[in-house]
Image (cartoon, grey):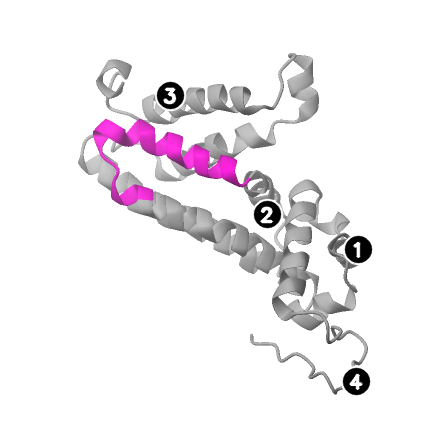
Amino acid sequence: MKITLPSANRRNGPGRPSTTDTYMDIRYALIKSSQNLFSNMPYDKVSTRLIAEKAGVSSSLIRYYFGGKEGLFETAVVSLCDSFFIQISKLIESTTCNNFSTFIFDVMQEIKKAPQLPKIMSHTLSLEKDNRYDNVVNIVLNSFNELYDKLVPQLQTRGILDTNMNPELSKVSIINLLLHPFNIPQTLLSAYSLESNGDFYEKVIEKNIELIIYGTSNFTPSLCA
C-alpha cells in the first residue's frame, strides 16, 4: 500500500512521521529492527515499543506504516526470505548430477549471507496456529514447497534421488538440515568446546550435504563425489 507522507506545511498529528523523516528511512529502520528482534526472540515477547526503540522512531509509526505488529512481522519475514528464495530458484535451473552437491553447498552459502534468515524462519514455522500470522507462515511454507516441487522431480527423473522416498518426510528432513546448523544453542556448542564460527559452519554444511545427498540418493558416495 502506498503511503502519502504529510506535506511540509501540514501539521503532524499523533502517529505521523515528522517532515524531516523519509518514508524509506523509517520503513527500513523498522524492518531491520524487527528482523533482528524476531530472529532472536519469540514473537509474543517482541513489543512494538521495543521495535521502535531499537529503530529510533516512535512506536506509533508501526501502525502508520504497517497497520500494526502483525503487518510489520509479515513484511520483515517476507523481505528477508524473498531474495533467498529468488536466488535458490536460479540455482535450481542449473542443477545436474555432477553439481548437485555444489548446489546444496551454494544454498548453505546463501543462508550464511543472512544469519538472521534461519532463525526467523525457524521462529516463524514454530508459531502456533493463529490467524494473526497464519499468512506469513503459509508464505514461508509455500516458498519451501515450491522450491522442493521444482527441484526434486528433476533429480528423480535423472535418477539422482530415490523415487520411492516419502515427499513429506523428505521436505521436513531437507528443511531441518538446511536451517538447523544455524540454530544450534550456544549452550550445546560450549558443552562440546565448539565455536559458532566460519570453520564450524563449513564442517556442518559439508556433513549435512552428505546426509541430504546420500540419505535420499540412488548413488554411492563415489559416484557423486
> Which residue is found at the position 62% from the left and 43% from the top?
123
Give the mark nearer the N terminus: 3 vs 2.
2
The residue pinned by badge 3 equals: 210
Residue 190 in percent (x, y) is at 68, 17
Residue 103 in percent (x, y) is at 33, 34
Q: Provide the secondary structure element on which disc 4 rests.
A: loop
Q: Which amino acid type is marked by label 1?
A: Glu
Measure how far apart labels 3 and 2 are at the Cα level. 27 Å
Give the mark nearer the N terminus: 3 vs 1.
1
Label ID, residue 124? 2
The residue pinned by badge 4 equals: 11
The residue pinned by badge 1 equals: 53
- Observer-side mark, 3 or 1, equals 1
> Which residue is found at the position 67% from the left and 57% from the top?
29
Q: Is residue 48 left or right of residue 224?
A: right
Measure how far apart labels 1 and 4 are at the Cα level. 24 Å
Q: Is residue 39 visible?
A: yes
Q: Provide the secondary structure element on which disc 2 rests.
A: helix
- Observer-side mark, 4 or 2, equals 4
Q: Which residues are magenta?
A: 91-114
> Which residue is found at the position 73% from the left and 68% from the top?
61
